[in-house]
Image: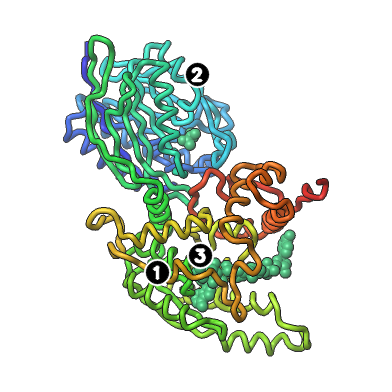
Amino acid sequence: MTDRLTVALAQLNPTVGDIRGNVDLARDALRRTREAGADVLLLPELFLSGYQPEDLVLKPFFLDKLEEAAQTLAAETEAGGPAILLPTPWRGPEGSARPRNSVLFLRNGAIETVRAKFDLPNYGVFDEKRVFEPGPMPGPININGVRVGVPICEDIWTPDVVECLQEAGAELFLVPNGSPYEDGKDDERLQIALARVVESGLPLAYLNQVGGQDELVYDGCSFVLNPNRSLAVQMRSFEDDFQVVTFERHDNGWVCLPGEMVEPPDRMESIYRAMVLGLRDYVHKNGFPGVVIGMSGGIDSALSAAVATDALGPDAVHCVMMPSPYTSQDSLDDAAEACRLLGVHLDAVNIGPAMAAFGEMLSPIFGDSPPGVTEENIQARARGVTLMAISNKKGYMVLTTGNKSEMSVGYATLYGDMCGGFSVLKDIYKLDVFALCRWRNGGLPGTGDPLLKGPVGAVMPERIITKPPSAELKPDQKDQDTLPPYEVLDDILHCLIEKEMSVDQIVAHGHAPELIQRVWRMLDTAEYKRRQAPPGVKITARAFGRERRYPITNSFRKIL
Ligand SMILES: Nc1ncnc2c1ncn2[C@@H]1O[C@H](COP(=O)(O)OP(=O)(O)OC[C@H]2O[C@@H]([n+]3cccc(C(=O)O)c3)[C@H](O)[C@@H]2O)[C@@H](O)[C@H]1O
Ligand SMILES: Nc1ncnc2c1ncn2[C@@H]1O[C@H](COP(=O)(O)OP(=O)(O)OP(=O)(O)O)[C@@H](O)[C@H]1O
Ligand SMILES: NC(=O)CC[C@H](N)C(=O)O
C-alpha cells in the first residue's frame, strides 16, 4: 500500500490561445517535477487553452489543436516518471454540442483517464454554460494506488461533488482552479475550501493560476489544507510559484507535511498588485512596447502612471502634458514632478491651437451661443486625438485614467478622456484612489521587489493627493461643483452598485433622498458610456462590464 504521494503544484501564468507556449510551460514544470522526484504534476484549470478561453472552445479546429498538444505531452510522460493532471477543454462523447471543462490524467506515455467539471459557474464573470457541457459526477483517479479526487474549481463551491468523490473512496483532493482576484476573495476561497475539508475530513490542495487575462487577474495564492483545518502550505500571491508537497498516510488518514508559508499581502497591496499584474499581462500578452498617458498633474493620471511604471518599468511609460489656457501652474509643476519621481519621459503638447481651430471651424454652426460643456468636451477630445496619434505613430497603447466613481456617474467625455485601450482604475472608487496613492507614496514593502519595476520611494508630490480634484476644463473648475463630495458620492454608489439597495435603504445611511435619486439617475444614464469604455482590471465583486449588465434603454426609475 502506498503511504506517500508527492505532488508538484505549478502555479503558472498561461496565455489564452497560446497552446504551444502553454505546452512549453507544462513541459518545463514536468522537468522540475521529475527533478524533484515527485509523483504527479498538477496544473491550474484549463491550463492548455488558458482560462477563460470563452468562445474559442466552440471552434472545432481549436479543440483539434488542444488534442494534438495533449497527445504530445502524454507521450512525454515516460514509464516510472511523474504523471500529469492536465486541465484542458476536451470533447465529450460523440454527439455532444459543446466540449467539457476537463482534466486529463497523463501517465506512461498515454492519456489514461479523463474527468470533467460537473458544476459550471454561470454568474458574475463566468459564462461556462454557454461554452461547456457539464460532465457526469466524477470518480476519483488512481494515482500510484491512492484514490485522488480532482474536483474542478466551482465543483468545490458546493458540497455535492466533494461528497460524491468521498463516497467513491477519495483519500485526498487536488483541485485545479481559475479563480479571478477580487477584493477579499482569498479569504472567501479559504472558507469554501475549509468547509469541504471539514465535511470530508480529507486534505485538499487548492491550485490557482496566476496572471492577467483581459479584465480578470488571477492571483495565485494557492494553498493546502489539512483535515485538522490547519494550513500546511500557502503559496505566493500575484506571481508564479512551484511547490512540491508531500502527502503521508497516517493512522487516522492522509495529511500534508508543512511546506512554504507566504503571508498574503494586505488589502491595499493586493489591490495595487492586481492592477500591476493586470496591466503588465495585458500590455505584454498583446505585444505593446509600452503605454502613453495623458498626465494632467491630477491624482488619477498620477496613480495610473505609477501602476504602469511598476508594471512595465520607466522606459515603457510615456507621459504627455497637454496644457490648455485653463491649466494651472500647479498642474504643470505636479505633472513634471510626478514624472521625475517615476523616472519616466514627459512630453508637452499644447492643445490651445486645436481648441482655437475647432472654435473657428464650428463658428458657422454655433454662431454666438455661449461656450459650455461642448467646448469643455472639445478639450478632452483634443487630448484624446493627440494621445491616439502618439499611439498610432509609436505603437504605445493609450492608458485611460477614469476611476469607478467617474465611470458610475458619466463624469468623463466620450471619445475624449475615455479613449484608450485599457484602464487600471476602472473598478477603483475615488476614495480608494486616494488611499492607494497614500499607500504607494509610503514606499514599496521590503527593499525592492523585482516584480515592481518603479522606484521604491514616493512617486508623486503630496499636493497631488491633497489638492481638490479638478478637470480644469474651465476657469477655477472643481469636481465638487457638479458632484457631491466623494465621501458621500462613493457611499451612495457603493449602496446602489455593490449592494443593489433601494432609495429608502440608502436614506438610512444618512443621505438625502433627492441626492440619492440624482446619483441613481446619473448612474443609469451613463450606462451608454460604460458600454463604450475600454476594458480594465476587475477589483470589486461588481465590476462594470460583464459582471453588471444593465440595459441602456431603461425607464425603471419612472415608475417610482
Ligand atoms: N443613451 C445614449 N446612447 C448613445 N449616445 C448617447 C446617449 N445619451 C447621450 N448620448 C451621446 O453622448 C453625448 C454626451 O456625452 P459626452 O459627449 O461625453 O458629454 P457629456 O456627458 O455631456 O459631458 C461630459 C461630462 O464629463 C465631465 N468631464 C469631462 C472630462 C473629464 C472629466 C473628469 O474630471 O474626469 C469630467 C464634464 O464636466 C461633463 O460633465 C451626447 O451629445 C450624445 O451624442
Ligand atoms: N492638461 C492635461 N494634460 C494631459 N492630460 C490631461 C490633461 N488634462 C486632462 N488630461 C487627461 O484626461 C484625464 C481626465 O482628466 P481630468 O483632469 O479632466 O479629470 P480627473 O479625473 O480629475 O483626472 P486627473 O486626476 O488625472 O486629473 C486625465 O487623467 C488625463 O489623462
Ligand atoms: N473557474 C471557476 O469555476 C471559478 C468559480 C469560483 N466560484 C471562483 O471564483 O473561484
Q: Is residue 326 above or below residue 60?
A: below
Disc on the earlier residue, 2 or 3: 2
Can you identify the residue that label 3 sits on?
401
Secondary structure of residue under mark 1: helix
Disc on the earlier residue, 1 or 3: 3
Disc 1 and disc 2 in contact, CB within 8 angstroms: no
Q: Is residue 75 above or below residue 511?
A: above
Dot in front, 1 or 3: 1
Residue at 51% across / 40% down in the picture? 57
Q: Is residue 206 visible?
A: yes
The residue furthest right is 559
Q: How are the colours assigned in the image? A: rainbow
Residue at 78% across / 88% down in the picture? 368
Label 1 environment density (alpha carbons within 10 Å; few <14, some 14–19, many ≥20) = some
Can you identify the residue that label 2 sits on?
160
| Left or right: 235 as drawn, with respect to 472 | left
Residue 258 pos. (x, y %): 22, 28
Residue type at tag 2 = Asp
Label 2 environment density (alpha carbons within 10 Å; few <14, some 14–19, many ≥20) = some
Can you identify the residue that label 1 sits on?
462
Secondary structure of residue under mark 3: loop
Disc 1 and disc 3 in contact, CB within 8 angstroms: no
- Give me the C-alpha separation between circle 2 and circle 3: 44 Å
- Give me the C-alpha separation between circle 1 and circle 2: 53 Å
